[in-house]
Image (cartoon, helix red, strand yellow):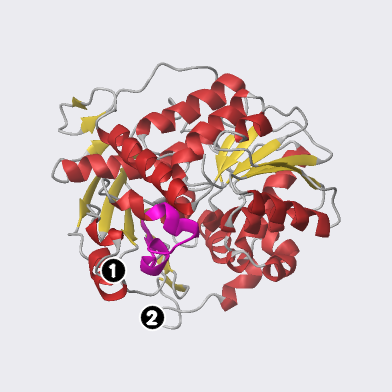
């Protein structure tokens, strides 16, 4: 494979279009149920559930990384600050990136890892190693599942960047592989480990907001310049907007809200509807910033600028998930959770409790920190903030994963969460394409969602 940017861009664009076609046209036959909701039959169970299955204990966690661009090297740096972890191997199609990552590992005082950079499929050689306990995947979305399947089938626990999968078939492939090979496949949703998110999770579990009724999550992030960049995500992420129309990136907003509502831990997503606006934002940005003869001026974007998805849970709660990366606005994940005694809303973080002495107005969280700060932040927060990584949440995520591996704990989230939190992507495409029709959520747990489980000890 040519190492030029143009060649890689062409490869990823072609694969993106093929993947988009698989997202709609390649699904198993859809059934219109008696309740008027579209449903995709679940495949036959592969093996016993992975719900609550603990890791085997590891004195030292040996890590391999596939994809050491901006995100991969950032998380690699966080992992290197965690005691008891070794980076044994790094992989990327660009040799300069593996060299940079390997040198970073050496500078941290570790032995230099083996580099894999011999074409698109050299990751398969990394996955065949027998001296790795965990493989972390930080590549363009179209590669996530095929790389995860290679890792799982070679006996490695696997951590995948978000979203874990782009189609429902891919979601089921991850579930089946995790069950078959008895290895965990986790989507590393870093927002679940934010200082505020973990504090609010403790408030919710303590009953401060009463009986929960609804939540809202979002990924409202102005990515226009990034999408048209000549490096990094600009080489592939814009292509997702060509033939897809829905919520392309649901997990940052959905993950924390799903935790508050104990989804896959006593409740589950039941069905959803989705609606998209027209697509004009990327077109307006490129008209103002690109030359008229730029080949990107000919691209046709189908993904609406704003997508709103409504999810109903089995217990009757409601979740709203927003997606907008194509228009100018401040970064916002909303992160709202509400119940019979009050509500929390983020950006900025604020809380309202029924009957509070301050009256009908939001108040800050400072007075609640002493009672509800999560122990991960009270113990590791200072180092986390020094390490960077989205305010420290990336380090907390890495530290907690290594802790679970070393102590033989079950992971905070598993393949069923990876599938459920990724599924609104393809399900929103189906709903939008069918005039915002309701679409049933697959039960990726195959009935194992009703048991009580904790997240990060809460």
Residue 115 picture location, percent across and down: 72, 43
Q: Residue at x 60, y 23 (%)?
A: 153
Element at label 1 = helix
**Pointer 1 with pointer 2, Cβ within 8 A:** no
The residue singled out by tag 1 in the image is: 286
How crowded pointer 1 is (Cα within 10 Å; few <14, some 14-19, many 20+) is rated as: some
Kindly state the secondary structure of the residue where label 2 is placed. loop
The residue stretch that appears in magenta:
215-237
Please indicate whether residue 151 sits to the left or right of residue 18 in the image.
right
Q: Is residue 443 left or right of residue 152?
A: left
**Residue that appears at 24% across and 69% down:** 292
Q: Is residue 285 magenta?
A: no
**Can residue 119 be seen?**
yes
N-terminal-most mark, 1 or 2: 1
Q: Nearer the viewer, residue 348 or 150?
A: 150
**Label 2 neighbour load within 10 Å: few <14, some 14-19, many 20+:** few
Residue 170 versus residue 210: which sits nearer the camera?
Answer: 170
Q: Which is more foreground, mark 1 or mark 2? A: 1
Q: Nearer the viewer, residue 255 or 247?
A: 247
The residue at 42%/32% (across/down) is 170
Residue picked out by circle 2: 361
User: Where 24 falls versus 140 (above or below)?
Assistant: above
Q: Going by the picture, which residue comes out furthest to the bottom?
A: 358
Instruction: Judge whether residue 267 can be spotted in this image.
Output: no
Q: What percent of the width, then of the height, locates residue 447?
A: 43, 26
Label at residue 48 = none
């Amino acid at each position: 494979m040519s190492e030029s940017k143009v060649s890689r861009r062409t490869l990823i664009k072609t694969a993106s279009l093929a993947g988009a076609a698989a997202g709609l046209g390649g699904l198993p036959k859809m059934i219109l149920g008696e309740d008027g909701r579209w449903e995709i039959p679940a495949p036959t169970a592969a093996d016993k559930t992975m719900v609550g299955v603990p890791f085997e204990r590891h004195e030292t966690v040996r890590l391999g990384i596939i994809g050491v661009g901006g995100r991969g090297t950032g998380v690699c740096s966080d992992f290197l600050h965690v005691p008891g972890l070794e980076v044994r191997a790094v992989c990327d199609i660009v040799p300069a990136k593996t060299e940079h990552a390997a040198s970073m590992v050496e500078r941290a005082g570790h032995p230099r890892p083996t580099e894999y950079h011999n074409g698109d499929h050299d990751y398969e050689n990394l996955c065949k190693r027998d001296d790795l306990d965990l493989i972390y995947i930080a590549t363009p979305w179209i590669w996530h599942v095929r790389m995860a399947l290679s890792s799982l089938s070679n006996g490695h626990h696997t951590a995948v960047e978000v979203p874990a999968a782009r189609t429902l078939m891919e979601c089921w492939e991850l579930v089946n592989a995790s069950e078959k090979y008895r290895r965990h496949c986790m989507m590393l949703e870093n927002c679940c480990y934010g200082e505020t998110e973990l504090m609010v999770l403790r408030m919710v579990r303590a009953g401060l907001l009463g009986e929960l009724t609804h939540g809202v999550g979002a990924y409202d992030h102005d990515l226009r310049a990034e999408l048209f960049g000549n490096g990094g995500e600009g080489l592939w992420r814009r292509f997702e907007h060509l033939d897809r129309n829905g919520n392309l990136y649901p997990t940052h907003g959905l993950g924390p809200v799903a935790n508050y509502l104990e989804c896959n831990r006593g409740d589950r997503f039941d069905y959803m509807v989705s609606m998209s606006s027209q697509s004009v934002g990327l077109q307006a940005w490129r008209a103002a910033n690109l030359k008229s003869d730029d080949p990107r001026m000919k691209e046709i974007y189908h993904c609406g600028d704003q997508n709103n998805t409504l999810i109903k849970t089995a217990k009757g709660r409601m979740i709203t998930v927003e997606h907008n990366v194509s228009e100018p606005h401040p970064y916002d994940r909303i992160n709202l959770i509400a119940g019979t005694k009050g509500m929390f809303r983020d950006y900025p973080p604020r809380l309202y409790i029924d009957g509070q002495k301050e009256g009908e107005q939001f108040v800050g969280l400072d007075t609640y920190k002493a009672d509800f700060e999560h122990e991960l932040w009270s113990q590791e927060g200072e180092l986390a903030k020094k390490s960077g990584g989205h305010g420290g949440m990336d380090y907390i995520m890495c530290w907690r994963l290594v802790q679970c591996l070393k102590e033989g704990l079950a992971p905070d989230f598993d393949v069923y969460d990876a599938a459920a939190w990724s599924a609104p992507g393809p399900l929103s495409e189906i709903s939008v394409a069918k005039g915002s029709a309701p679409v049933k959520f697959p039960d990726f747990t195959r009935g194992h969602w009703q048991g009580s489980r904790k997240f990060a000890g809460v």
